[in-house]
Amino acid sequence: MTTAIPANAPAAASPASGNLRPRITSIDALRGLIMFTMIFVNDLAGAPRELVPDWMVHFSDRHPEGVSGMTFVDLVFPGFLFIVGMSIPFALGSRLAKGEAVGKTMVHILIRTLSLLLLGGRKRGRRPAPVTRGKSPPRWRCMPRTTKNCCRLPRPSGTT
């Protein structure tokens, strides 16, 4: 079945009209696939060991130390970094093409970077993982206080 478009119908917004930014479908598709995979893999991390096959967990989680290898799960973070790297030139180019000042763009980047770092520190600082990834426990304990003082977020109930 086909649908005919009436001749007097309004024209769809086009990238040239300024109403819509052109999107690069391949970057959007890969970004969606990576985000889906990231959520899927994180959900599997909490599943019982017997239910998840070896190829669906990090290689290092199921093999003795000193053995090298990788599974598709080990490709999620590098894939995420790749897609971020692919998107940055297009995002910056779009802002500069609109005539935004370079200084204003740099301030936007700085604010966004600091916001993400503070949110990440706040989330990771509440309950340190059993492996502290090189940080001492006192440093982990000070992170919630530091981020609370910087962004004035309410302290969760039951914490000191």
Image: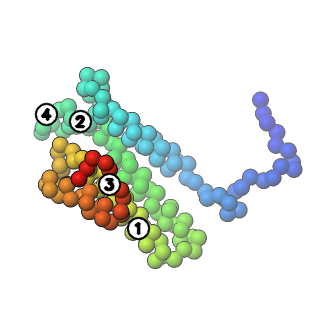
User: Label 2 belongs to which residue?
Assistant: 59
Residue 130 image point, x, y percent: 17, 43
What amino acid type is highlighted by mark number 1? Ile
Left or right for 49, reference 38: left
User: Label 1 belongs to which residue?
Assistant: 111
Residue shown at 78% from the left, 33% from the top:
2
Residue located farthest toward the right when viewing the structure as drawn = 8
Density class for disc 4 (Cα within 10 Å; few <14, some 14-19, many ≥20) is: few
Distance from label 4 to label 2 (Cα)?
Answer: 9 Å
Density class for disc 2 (Cα within 10 Å; few <14, some 14-19, many ≥20) is: some
Q: Is residue 47 above or below residue 22?
A: above
Q: Is residue 48 above or below residue 117?
A: above
Which of the two discs, 4 and 3, labels the residue nearer the N terminus?
4
Which of the two discs, 4 and 2, labels the residue nearer the N terminus?
2
Q: Nearer the viewer, residue 18 or 132?
A: 132
Residue 157 image point, x, y percent: 31, 48
* In this view, the mark in front (2 or 3): 3
What amino acid type is highlighted by mark number 4? Pro
User: Label 3 belongs to which residue?
Assistant: 155
